[in-house]
């Protein structure tokens, strides 16, 4: 945990944002895999961590703004619990570590809500079934209505606080990124013809665990990089293929790292692979060079997109005017996702609160254009924002065939030349950046990504 003063200050600002009413923060519970005593790895709710820091199941908090009172609800371990799980801090001790004065048992939460049922009760959109049912019972509403009745005022307040990272948070993110660096360099050194993707995926997840950390999302490591979120690890590596490794560690305090590197199974990129890789590298570089406060991330996305359209035209895969191609969305055949997303306690930070609250703002609507519609972060950048910069080029056979069959963007796409690339896969390069007062800076130690750096590592692996 951070110092209790940090959590006290965060809650103070939250109360000022919302103004009045009761704020209900359910903590996450243990979830059984196949019977109650065999449970999935526990992960606390990120907003609960942000405001209270308590990283254990079975706790809930009420912030009563009008009464200026914060109450931690939970139960002390009894002897049967201690036998199996060991002695644990009391509820009172946990409350003190978070700067909370008042405690109560879990059963008393229902009484507190019922006693104050006529007052405004704010809660965030729940994403777990047990929490939906809990809120449904507490507030006497059908489970179907729980999400729709989440507090917009509380969502906006939480986003406004969590979106700008403090010095302490940035230090945690950099710890996560530096563990992630070791994961990626290890993957580059391990890849050889004949081994399986799972050999590498398992090894790099083990690195995160060996640091006392965890992975911030399921590892994406695949020779089929044309599938954007490919979690299958059963392919055998073969000379001439490319590997996309999109993975990240989560720090001890649950802040995320999220990095992608693409590298060849062999010692060197092929000529064709080098062309595409260099184009993605150049697009990322152009995007990074444009990062500064006041610039919208939508425009940064379009800068990368125009770099792609110009480069693909040089390679004979696109044609016509690159500006027009991007304006009409033809480039999205190759770049169908957004340039990046906010990052912090969640790898897609606060996505459970609603992407449009996090990545957009009033007056800025999400585009309906294919590709651009998937942009998670579009609003103007501000100092303290932490986010990913992850351009990619993909050759998705079924999407190519669909657009070709529809004669889609035939003025911009050279479908005949594109047939030669349907077995290519994909390339993505991703790094994590912090917006500063004057520009932006890379988080964590640099991770090899130039063609020369990657080929040096790959050659030394043999």
Image: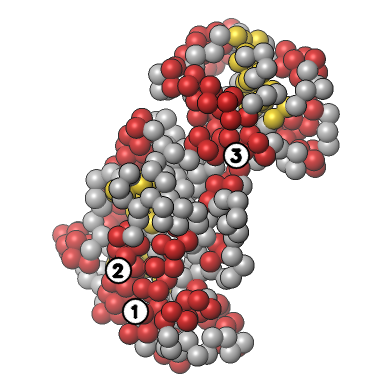
Q: Taking the image as drawn, is residue 86 in sight?
A: no
Q: Nearer the viewer, residue 441 or 398?
A: 441
Residues under labels 1 and 3: Cα distance?
40 Å
Q: Is residue 127 above or below residue 65?
A: below
- Mark 2 or 1, nearer chain start: 2
At 62% across and 87% down in the image, what residue appears?
A: 406
- Mark 3 or 2, nearer chain start: 3
Q: Which residue is mark 3?
A: 156
- Residue 408 rendering spot, x and y as whole percentages: 57, 86
Is the C-beta separation of discs 2 and 1 under 8 Å? yes
**Which quadrant is the C terminus positioned in?**
bottom left
- Mark 1 or 3, nearer chain start: 3
> Circle 2 sits in a helix, a strand or a loop, which is it?
helix
Residues under labels 2 and 1: Cα distance?
9 Å
Residues under labels 3 and 2: Cα distance?
36 Å
Q: Nearer the viewer, residue 103 or 234?
A: 103
Direction from residue 175 to residue 388 in the image, left or right: right
Q: Which residue is mark 2?
A: 282
């Amino acid at each position: 945990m951070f110092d209790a003063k940090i959590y006290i200050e965060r809650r103070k600002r939250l109360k000022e944002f919302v103004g009045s009413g009761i704020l209900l923060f359910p903590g996450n519970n243990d979830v059984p895999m196949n019977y109650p005593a065999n449970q999935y790895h526990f992960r606390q709710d990120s907003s609960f961590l942000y405001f209270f820091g308590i990283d254990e199941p079975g706790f809930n908090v009420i912030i009563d703004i009008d009464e200026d009172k914060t109450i931690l609800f939970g139960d002390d371990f009894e002897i049967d619990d201690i036998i199996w799980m060991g002695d644990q801090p009391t509820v009172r001790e946990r409350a003190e570590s978070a700067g909370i004065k008042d405690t109560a048992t879990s059963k008393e939460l229902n009484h507190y809500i019922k006693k104050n049922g006529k007052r405004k009760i704010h809660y965030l959109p729940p994403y777990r079934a047990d929490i939906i049912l809990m809120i449904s019972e507490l507030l006497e509403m059908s489970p179907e209505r729980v999400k729709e009745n989440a507090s917009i005022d509380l969502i906006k307040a939480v986003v406004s606080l969590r979106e700008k990272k403090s010095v302490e948070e940035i230090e945690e993110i950099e710890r996560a990124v530096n563990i992630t660096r070791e994961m990626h360099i290890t993957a580059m050194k391990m890849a050889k013809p004949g081994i399986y993707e799972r050999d590498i995926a398992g090894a790099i997840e083990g690195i995160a665990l060996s640091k006392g950390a965890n992975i911030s999302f399921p590892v994406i490591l695949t020779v089929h990089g044309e599938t954007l979120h490919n979690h299958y690890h059963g392919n055998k590596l073969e000379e001439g293929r490319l590997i996309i490794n999109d993975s990240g560690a989560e720090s001890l305090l649950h802040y995320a790292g999220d990095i992608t590197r693409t590298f060849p199974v062999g010692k060197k990129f092929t000529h064709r692979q080098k062309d595409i890789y260099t184009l993605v590298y150049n697009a990322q570089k152009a995007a990074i060079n444009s990062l500064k406060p006041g610039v919208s991330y939508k425009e940064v996305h379009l800068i990368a997109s125009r770099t792609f359209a110009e480069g693909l035209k040089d390679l004979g895969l696109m044609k016509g005017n690159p500006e027009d191609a991007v304006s009409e969305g033809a480039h999205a055949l190759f770049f169908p996702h957004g340039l990046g997303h906010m990052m912090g306690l969640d790898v897609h930070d606060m996505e459970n609160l609603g992407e449009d609250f996090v990545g957009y703002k009033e007056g800025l609507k999400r585009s309906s254009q294919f590709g651009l519609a998937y942009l998670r972060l579009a609003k103007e950048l501000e100092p303290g924002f932490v986010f990913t910069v992850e351009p990619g080029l993909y050759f998705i056979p079924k999407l190519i065939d669909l657009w070709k069959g529809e004669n889609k963007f035939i003025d911009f796409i050279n479908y005949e030349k594109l047939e030669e690339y349907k077995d290519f896969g994909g390339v993505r390069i991703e790094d994590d950046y912090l917006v500063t007062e004057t520009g932006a800076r890379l988080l964590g130690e640099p991770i090899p990504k130039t063609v020369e750096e990657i080929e040096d590592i790959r050659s030394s692996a043999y």
